[in-house]
Image (cartoon, helix red, strand yellow):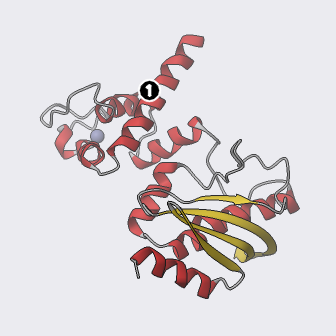
C-alpha cells in the first residue's frame, strides 16, 4: 500500500463520516465534517459536508476543499470563485505541509480553523482571530511576516532576488538596512527560496507581488 493510501485509510478511521474514492490523479475524500472545537473559550459545534481532492503529489500539491451543503454564510468572503475554500495563503500552507505532511494534520489544522472561522462568523458576524486579507494583499502580508519585515519596499527588493530579477550576491549589504552582509541576514531565506523544490511557487508569488506593487504605484 502506498504511503498516501495509508494516510487516506487513517483519515477514514479518524473521521468515520468521510469516505474516499480513487480519482485519476489522487483521492476524493467526501462526507460530513463535524466541527467541534474551541478557541478563546468559545466552543463551536457545526456540521459541514466537504469534498476534498488530495493529489497523488501530496504534500507538494496542496489539497483543495469545497463545502457542498451550503452551510457557509453567503457573506463570508473566503471562498474562491470556483467554490474552493481559501484555507490560507499558499506560502503558509506550503510551510505547514513541509513541517507536517499529513492529511489528518491538514484537516485538524487549516480545514478546521477555516470552518471554525466560518461558524464564528455565522454567529457573531465577525472573525475570531486576526486573519489575512483576501487575495494578493494577504500574500504580501504573509511574505512580510515570513521575511520579518514591515517595509514593503524592502520586501520588494528581496523578492526581486527570488524572482530572478536581481542576481544573488552574498557579500553586498542586506536590503533590509540591518548593516549586515546579505548572506548573514535575509540572504539566507532568499537562498532557501531560490533553491527550494517549490522555487516555482515562490518565484510566481514574487513576480505577482512586484507586479501588483508597481501597478498600484502607477495608479496614484
Ligand atoms: Zn536583512
Dot 1 alpha-carbon crowd within 10 angstroms: few under 14, some 14 to 19, many 20 or more:
many
Residue at 37 percent of width and 31 percent of height: 154
Q: Is residue 106 left or right of residue 130?
A: left
**Position in image of residue 25 (x %, y %):** 50, 60
Q: Is 104 located above or below residue 134 in the figure?
A: below
Which residue is under mark 1? 210
| Nearest to the observer: residue 99 or residue 129 | 99
Q: Provide the secondary structure element on which disc 1 rests.
A: helix
Say which quadrant the C terminus sits in: top right
Residue 30 visible in the current orientation? yes
Q: In this view, does 125 lie to the left or right of 63?
A: right
**Position in image of residue 216 (x %, y %):** 56, 19
**Position in image of residue 132 (x %, y %):** 61, 47
Q: Is 52 located above or below residue 12 in the figure?
A: above
| Nearest to the observer: residue 75 or residue 20 | 20
Residue at 66 percent of width and 77 percent of height: 19
Amino acid at each position: 500500500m502506498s504511503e498516501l493510501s495509508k494516510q487516506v485509510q487513517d483519515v477514514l478511521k479518524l473521521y468515520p463520516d468521510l469516505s474516499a474514492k480513487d480519482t485519476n490523479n489522487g483521492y476524493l475524500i467526501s462526507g460530513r465534517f463535524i466541527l467541534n472545537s474551541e478557541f478563546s473559550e468559545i466552543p463551536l459545534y457545526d456540521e459541514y459536508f466537504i469534498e476534498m481532492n488530495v493529489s497523488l503529489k501530496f504534500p507538494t500539491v496542496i489539497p483543495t476543499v469545497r463545502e457542498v451543503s451550503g452551510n457557509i454564510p453567503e457573506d463570508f468572503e473566503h471562498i474562491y470563485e470556483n467554490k474552493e475554500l481559501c484555507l490560507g495563503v499558499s506560502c503558509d500552507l506550503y510551510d505547514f505541509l513541509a513541517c507536517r505532511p499529513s492529511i489528518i494534520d491538514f484537516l485538524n489544522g487549516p480545514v478546521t480553523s477555516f470552518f471554525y472561522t466560518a461558524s464564528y462568523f455565522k454567529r457573531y458576524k465577525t472573525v475570531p482571530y486576526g486573519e489575512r486579507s483576501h487575495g494578493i494583499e494577504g500574500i504580501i502580508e504573509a511574505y512580510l511576516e515570513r521575511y520579518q519585515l514591515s517595509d514593503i519596499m524592502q520586501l520588494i527588493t528581496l523578492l526581486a532576488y527570488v524572482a530572478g530579477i536581481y542576481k544573488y550576491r552574498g557579500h553586498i549589504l542586506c536590503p533590509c538596512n540591518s548593516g549586515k552582509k546579505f548572506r548573514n541576514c535575509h540572504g539566507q531565506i532568499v537562498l532557501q527560496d531560490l533553491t527550494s523544490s517549490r522555487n516555482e511557487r515562490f518565484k510566481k508569488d514574487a513576480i505577482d507581488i512586484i507586479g501588483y506593487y508597481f501597478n498600484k504605484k502607477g495608479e496614484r
